[in-house]
């Protein structure tokens, strides 16, 4: 079949909107008609050329929602008409990682996914002249239709609005999940969130759910203070207004009883390795944990004095909020439908596919929280 897609032909260039060929689903695969997709900073990261796994030409996008059109041989858990969210972290429930119950990082198809291919080692997308187009993060949601492995689709409430719950496909789950699944933040905790964009604001609403006492937002964009306030932030710091952000946060968290100070949990949602260091060092001596969510460019490395770890701080990472997609994503959609979490106000712009490059511009300029493309 043919479908309409935004194709990343080269790093650093705008996406090109064009008709592309899409082969139907093979065994274990599913054809999905996408109804909406968000634009995440990771799409911009890969488009910029900073992603060591970046391949071109590719159809980017990994934050979608849509309807199953057709299923390949052997698919049992989905049927045409089901509403689904594509998962860049699948859940096969059979691999060593899934069975370990220690991680959400299913390894069933990770190797081919990183090569921009379906699990059988081929691509379903091609240009009209036959040039193959790579898949992206196993999803490629910047196309009106895509083919996905069955294990990488979460079946969701058919009443959930696509234009909102597509955001559960990455940003919402990543932010809330990092708090609940990875950090396991307890009531009364003192926390700092670095970077209040599409991910950081969801960390903030996760911290509100967890009952944190101090939710300190840190961002160089002063407009983000108002955004943080809307979702439960209790304090805001612009690092440009202080000589030493680490000392500043440590002082803010001191009490008459605890003159050591430091955060119980910090979250990096910037992808900047200097910020990751600040986030670690702003943690409380003896127990503070820092969760790295941001994705750093090829070649970037984190550093700190080992003494920071010797004295009890822990550095952790989080992918897709530690969520097991087929199990947890439908539940997060239900939380949204029940009014337990907010999504609507974070979707600042809705665009047509033809306008997708404008969505990237808004993201680069810090003028959007989430732009969503509607098909
Ligand atoms: P975004 O562009 O919406 O937000 C980034 C925010 O960080 C902005 O508000 C920006 O002003 C702020 N910022 C930039 N530099 C800063 C600094 N030095 N100090 C403080 N704040 C700073 O991006 P997003 O969509 O929220 O994504 C955030 C990061 O998370 C990206 O690196 C993205 O690739 C990554 N990400 C990771 C996962 C995961 O599973 N680990 C999932 C989604 C996104
Ligand atoms: N390809 C990059 C790493 C990208 C990365 O870390 N991706 C996150 C999801 S970001 C979503 O917006 C992730 O889940 N990673 C786990 C995985 O298996 O990819 C690089 O540096 O090579
Ligand atoms: Zn993302």
Image (tube, grey):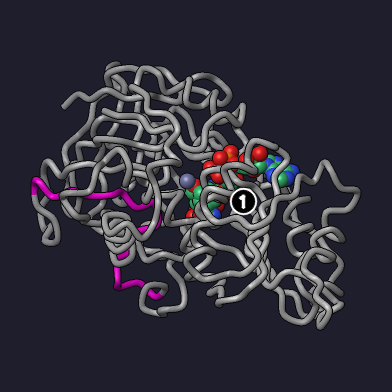
The location of residue 315, given as percent across then percent down, is 69, 69
Q: Let me know if residue 160 appears in the view.
A: yes
Residue at position x 46%, y 57% from top? 320
Q: How many marks?
A: 1
Residue at position x 16%, y 27% from top? 1
Establish whether ligand 1 lies closer than 8 Å to the Cβ of label 1: yes
The location of residue 215, given as percent across then percent down, is 63, 61
Q: Nearer the viewer, residue 22 or 66?
A: 66
Q: Nearer the viewer, residue 29 or 297?
A: 297
> Which image quadrant is residue 122 in?
top left
Q: Nearer the viewer, residue 30 or 314?
A: 314
Q: Let me know if residue 299 appears in the view.
A: no
Which segment did they paint magenta? 80-96
Q: Name the side, left or right, on which 37 lies relative to 284.
A: left
Residue at position x 48%, y 40% from top? 40
Q: Name the side, left or right, on which 153 lies relative to 239.
A: left
Instruction: Quadrant for the C terminus, please.
Output: top left
Q: Disc 1 designates what residue? A: 269
The location of residue 7, given as percent across then percent down, is 40, 24
Q: Give the vertical position of 208 relative to 133 (above or below).
A: below
Check residue 95 for magenta coloring: yes
């Amino acid at each position: 079949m043919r479908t309409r897609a935004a194709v990343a032909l080269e790093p650093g260039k705008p996406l090109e909107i064009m008709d592309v060929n899409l082969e139907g689903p093979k065994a274990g695969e599913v054809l999905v008609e996408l109804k909406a997709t968000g634009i995440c900073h990771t799409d911009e990261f890969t488009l910029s050329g900073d992603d060591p796994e970046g391949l071109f030409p590719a159809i980017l996008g990994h934050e979608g929602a849509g309807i199953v059109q057709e299923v390949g041989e052997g698919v049992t858990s989905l049927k045409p008409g089901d509403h689904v969210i594509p998962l860049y972290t699948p859940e096969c429930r059979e691999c060593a990682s899934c069975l370990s119950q220690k991680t959400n990082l299913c390894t069933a198809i990770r190797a081919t996914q990183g090569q921009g291919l379906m699990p059988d080692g081929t691509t379903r997308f091609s240009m009209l002249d036959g040039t193959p187009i790579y898949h992206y993060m196993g999803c490629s949601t910047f196309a009106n239709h895509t083919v996905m492995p069955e294990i990488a689709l979460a079946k969701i409430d058919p009443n959930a609005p696509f234009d909102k719950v597509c955001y559960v496909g990455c940003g919402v789950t990543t932010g809330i999940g990092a708090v609940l699944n990875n950090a396991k933040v307890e009531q009364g905790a003192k926390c700092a969130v670095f970077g209040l964009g599409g991910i950081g604001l969801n960390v903030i609403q996760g911290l509100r759910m967890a009952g944190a006492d101090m939710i300190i937002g840190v961002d160089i964009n002063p407009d983000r203070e108002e955004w943080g306030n809307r979702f439960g932030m209790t304090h805001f710091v612009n690092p440009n207004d202080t000589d030493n952000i680490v000392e500043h946060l440590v002082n803010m968290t001191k009490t008459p009883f605890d003159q050591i100070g430091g955060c119980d949990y910090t979250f990096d949602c910037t992808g900047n390795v200097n910020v990751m260091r600040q986030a670690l060092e702003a943690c409380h001596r003896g127990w503070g944990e820092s969760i790295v969510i941001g994705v750093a460019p090829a070649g970037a490395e984190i550093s700190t004095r080992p003494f920071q770890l010797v004295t009890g701080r822990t550095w952790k990472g989080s992918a897709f909020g530690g969520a097991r997609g087929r199990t947890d994503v439908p539940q997060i959609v239900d939380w949204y439908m029940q009014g337990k979490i907010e999504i609507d106000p974070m979707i600042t712009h809705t665009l047509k596919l033809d306008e997708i490059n404008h969505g990237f511009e808004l993201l680069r300029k810090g003028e959007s929280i989430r732009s969503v493309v509607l098909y």
